Image (spheres, coloured by chain):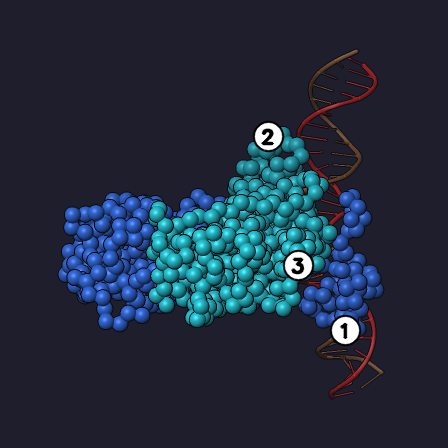
Chain colours: A cyan, B blue, C brown, D red
Amino acid sequence: MTPSGRPRRATLPDVAALAGVSTAAAGRALGGYGSVSEDVRRRVAEAARQLDYRANRLAASVRTGRTDTIGVVCADIESPFFARALRGISDVAREKGFSTLVTNSDEDLASEREAVQLLLHKQVDGIICAPADVTRVDHLARAQSDGTPVVLFDRVSDRLEADAVVVDGMKAAYQAVRRLLDLGHRRVAIVTELRQPREQDWARLLDPEIAASPGELSPSEARLLGYLRAHWDAGVPVRRELVRRTGTYAADAAYQQTRRVLALKNPPTAIFTVDNLMTVGAYRAIRELGIAVPDRLSVVAFDDLDWTVLVSPALTVIAQPVYEMGAEAARRLIRRLRDPQPEPPATLFMDVALIERESVAPVGGQTPATPR
Amino acid sequence: MTPSGRPRRATLPDVAALAGVSTAAAGRALGGYGSVSEDVRRRVAEAARQLDYRANRLAASVRTGRTDTIGVVCADIESPFFARALRGISDVAREKGFSTLVTNSDEDLASEREAVQLLLHKQVDGIICAPADVTRVDHLARAQSDGTPVVLFDRVSDRLEADAVVVDGMKAAYQAVRRLLDLGHRRVAIVTELRQPREQDWARLLDPEIAASPGELSPSEARLLGYLRAHWDAGVPVRRELVRRTGTYAADAAYQQTRRVLALKNPPTAIFTVDNLMTVGAYRAIRELGIAVPDRLSVVAFDDLDWTVLVSPALTVIAQPVYEMGAEAARRLIRRLRDPQPEPPATLFMDVALIERESVAPVGGQTPATPR
DNA sequence: GGATGGGTTGAGAACCTTCTCATCATCCCG
DNA sequence: CGGGATGATGAGAAGGTTCTCAACCCATCC
């Protein structure tokens, strides 16, 4: 009996004793390693059943050094993007016998560091992380060099030799914005967070050399770059007042910025929102102002959300394979866990799809011929 | 060096040796238990820093029996409801020094059993669970009697003596439906999942005795009961053809059912959807059919989602304090962990709010005077 | 000056597994 | 029938921590 009066849970020696074998044999019988006779296996199983034995996987982990757990650091589990990705991760993980320990960084580097620290203390076998700052990944590098593999998710960093699963945000944004420009739009607004609005950011994006290697860019920066390039290639000048940064990652800020940009003397005829939170805020502003979409304003949003088909007109969006991205990240991590030195780390770029619905029209405003 | 060539991580004895103290002393110094002199504390800290010591919390857990981890069994992490609740849970958990191990049951009893089993193997300190079937909770009862406290979330079961954090779904639904009836609606449809459409369910809900103790009802059943009661109290007969069950928990099914109910010769003038997935499906049908809301159809939805203000007209909804529910569940669980025998388990009913927006009008169809 | 008591300290057990290794029985084969 | 391979078994170490306990120091108090 424990001090609390509850009967203590049966342990391996208890089972072994009841079955009349050694602890080692009982362990083998239940753990499925080593070799045991059929007879012993049966007796041990029976004893375990009788005692309602429940293996303590913690103890096993101390011994083996494996916990069959993968740690996930996401920005915010509440966001549909991460929620769905996590579903992909945990489905694959479960299938392969792993659990998932989830933490939120809220896009804050310090929280992320703390989270990684915690995961390492808890001895997770590997980590999937959406790094808050792709230029500050030393903690991940250290985890990795200490033997805990890392897979980057949603964001690459060329300062870390690790697998990564991402989307080519630059290409996707380019494609969407190019489409708008081709339809004759000359004033296309973009609503983006972009946390540190360092003045040199803008310059960085203009630098063709940096622009060529997206490993230094956050997703938002990459998408902004796509926006800029589409303009350059189309020979349309970029209007500074149409590039709206919220500075903070919040729908409300996007709402404010959108109201402001739509209140310009010379307002945009199209707007591109850079992720789901920005879309929510921007769309609220558009709706509140009662602006006719797509007649007066065309809208393209990054990320497909279930409500984008519920509003009228339905939103044209860039859809990322979010679930699959999560699943693939988990697959890669687990592959690396199983096979210590498989192949050199690689970045997987997954395809996005531009889903044309009803919120885009040629400038001037006729609705396109084929609404859906 | 480990076989792999990497230097082995420093352990407590290593630190102790470098600091020139016993392992026990080093453990005390770093772990913050027992008593140590200032001098020792400093030397140990310095040694730990030099060796880049990282505590193995697994080993500690084996010894202490605590893992500072709480297990969560939710139906589907991808649903906005659970995603937000999980955020509440993990915020509180983190603040109090706990991690969260997350599993999905997909509303399937077998998966839930498996998940609980896994959590127990991993020795979580406690479990927060949204049980798939409130009448089958033996596995949770066993976990609890074995010393792993359980807090029910979103659903009560009177077959389990445990804390629970829920919403009074019956009252909420009653309130919403009553409002519709008071506005003159006589044909109010309800779209609900309700997994096992056992024929006796209906009878159960009619039985006043069972209806009095909601501890046997799933949230969907409770909400249906609220719907029924509102009718009884208002003296409005319940039309069987207006009660639409999807049988399966999917937006598509809700879409189908909604199309069907709206295609009746004598269609409803109002519709009540029972949770977020049902709302998405039902609203898609309404939009596709081009039915004017609220002029021809009033709409009330359970659960407030970010898009309910983005559609026009904005949806009138019943809002649950989802984040707070998660947070409170975590608080209760942790309180019980800290204090083995605090008070008897209790069910906390949290308040819902009926948020009136633009999707409800008196029957016949004028828009109400105060749109927002 | 001895008793009391609180703060420090280290030895070693404990937690519950897995793993190594030596032992032993069995079996196959030449 | 000897030699070697194969498989089953148990003793005991290992994994990295926490905890118990006895010993010790030193100050205080009578």
Residue B177: quarter of image: bottom left
Question: Does any portion of residue B2 appear in the rendered image?
Answer: yes
Q: Residues within 10 Å of mark 2 (few under 14, many from 20)?
A: few
Residue A50 horizontal side relative to residue B348, left or right: right
Q: Nearer the viewer, mark 1 or mark 2?
A: 1
Name the amino acid type tagged 2.
Asp
Name the amino acid type tagged 1.
Ser
Tell me the subunit letter for badge 3. Answer: A
Question: Looking at the rendered structure, which numbered label has been put on residue A44?
Answer: none
The residue indicated by pointer 2 is A39
Question: Looking at the rendered structure, which numbered label has been put on residue B37?
Answer: 1
Question: Looking at the rendered structure, which numbered label has been put on residue A207?
Answer: 3
- At a point 23% along the width and 71% down the height, the residue shown is B369
Q: Residues within 10 Å of mark 1 (few under 14, many from 20)?
A: few
- Gap in angstroms between the C-alphas marked 3 and 2: 73 Å
Q: Nearer the viewer, mark 3 or mark 1?
A: 3
Residues A206 and A319: in front is A206
Residues B72 and A46: in front is B72
Q: Residues within 10 Å of mark 3 (few under 14, many from 20)?
A: few
Residue B158 lies, in percent from the top left, at 36, 57
